Image (cartoon, helix red, strand yellow):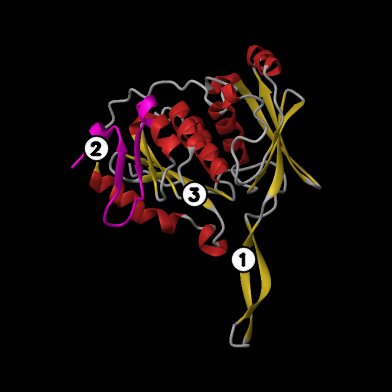
């Protein structure tokens, strides 16, 4: 049976949520003095509160779609849970000023969360807001041990197919994407968001919900590859991360230490191999 790509916004959410993008009447001003009225699209972003067992933990600015995926992926990548079953339910509740994700967390995990509770003032450009110590930044990561092998042709295929799968960014030109492809390079999941960390969290949540082995493929991101993106990828058990942009030096060191295969500056004709190239087939 052919595999079907699940694109951003296809997952069903409860309640009436805002659209991912909105039409807007804009005026384009030329430096030569010309003026042209045009209909364009703007990406929507809303405050999204993650509430665990009735207690607010974080508020992130995010795109209003795939929010159950976001709740599950954020919880896993931030170490709030270790297994998908530790979230018993997620309720998406729209409010006048934002959206609330009510997450029913297993009692043991909730107790641990209260012990290390922090408040994050979420922003689309920062994944470390609200951490209260240097130790919290440099957290220990699980070793990526997957024996996954991926041909370079599969990575090329996924990169070529990704732009067409970014349906909302094609309209608004302001959304990051995170995607998961199998070892043949076929895209299985694509998630979009105004925040690059959010897009990756949504992707992790989608993979978890679908009960897909993350070692059975690789992740692609359209944003720069920073420390937090490597952390989230390694914690999710994804063996290979492909970034269309450059990584930071710290992200590269962390990927190397964690056993993660990191590829960057991915283009139509080449990709830069930074760490653990043993998972790549010519």
As drawn, 212 above or below 219: above
Mark 2–mark 3 distance (CA, rounded to whole Å): 23 Å
Give the magenta-colored segment's residue range: 255-282
Residue 281 is left or right of residue 59, and the answer is left
Give the structural element (helix, strand or loop) at label 2. strand
* Disc 3: CA contacts within 10 A as few (<14), some (14-19) or many (>=20): many
Residue 214 is left or right of residue 23, and the answer is left
Single out the mark in the foreground, 2 or 1: 2
Q: Residue at label 1? A: 41
Q: Position of residue 195 (x, y in %)?
A: 58, 46
Q: Residue at label 3? A: 177
Q: Position of residue 2 (x, y in %)?
A: 33, 44
As drawn, 37 above or below 275: below
Q: Residue at label 2? A: 280
- The image quadrant that residue 238 belongs to is top left
- Magenta region includes residue 42: no
Residue located at (57% from left, 62% from top): 172
Sequence-wise, which precedes: disc 2 or disc 3?
A: 3
Quadrant where the N terminus sits is: top left
Residue at the far bottom in the pictured view: 33
Residue located at (48% from left, 49% from top): 223
Give the structural element (helix, strand or loop) at label 1. strand
- Magenta region includes residue 274: yes
Mark 3–mark 1 distance (CA, rounded to whole Å): 17 Å
């Amino acid at each position: 049976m052919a595999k079907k790509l699940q694109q951003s916004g296809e997952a069903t959410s409860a309640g009436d949520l805002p659209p991912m993008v909105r039409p807007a009447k804009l005026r384009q001003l030329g430096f030569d003095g010309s003026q042209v009225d045009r209909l364009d699209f703007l990406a929507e972003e809303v405050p999204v509160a993650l509430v665990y067992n009735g207690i607010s933990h974080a508020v992130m600015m995010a795109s209003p779609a795939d929010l159950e995926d976001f709740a599950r992926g954020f919880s896993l990548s931030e170490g709030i849970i270790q297994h998908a079953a530790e979230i018993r339910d997620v309720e998406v509740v729209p409010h006048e000023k934002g959206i609330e994700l009510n997450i029913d967390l297993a009692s043991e995990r909730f107790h641990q969360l209260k012990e290390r509770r922090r408040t994050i003032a979420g922003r689309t450009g920062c994944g470390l807001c609200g951490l209260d110590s240097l130790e919290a930044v440099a957290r220990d990561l699980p070793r990526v041990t997957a024996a996954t092998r991926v041909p370079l042709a599969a990575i090329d295929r996924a990169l070529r197919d990704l732009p067409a799968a970014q349906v909302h960014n094609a309209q608004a030109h302001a959304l990051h994407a995170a995607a998961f492809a199998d070892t043949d390079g076929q895209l299985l999941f694509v998630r979009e968001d105004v925040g690059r960390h959010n897009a990756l969290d949504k992707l992790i949540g989608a993979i978890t919900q679908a009960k897909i082995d993350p070692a059975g493929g690789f992740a692609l991101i359209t944003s720069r590859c920073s420390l937090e993106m490597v952390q989230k990828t390694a914690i999710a058990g994804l063996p290979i991360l492909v970034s269309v942009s450059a990584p930071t030096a710290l992200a590269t060191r962390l990927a190397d230490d964690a056993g993660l295969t990191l590829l960057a500056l991915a283009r139509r004709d080449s990709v830069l191999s930074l760490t653990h190239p043993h998972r790549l087939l010519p």
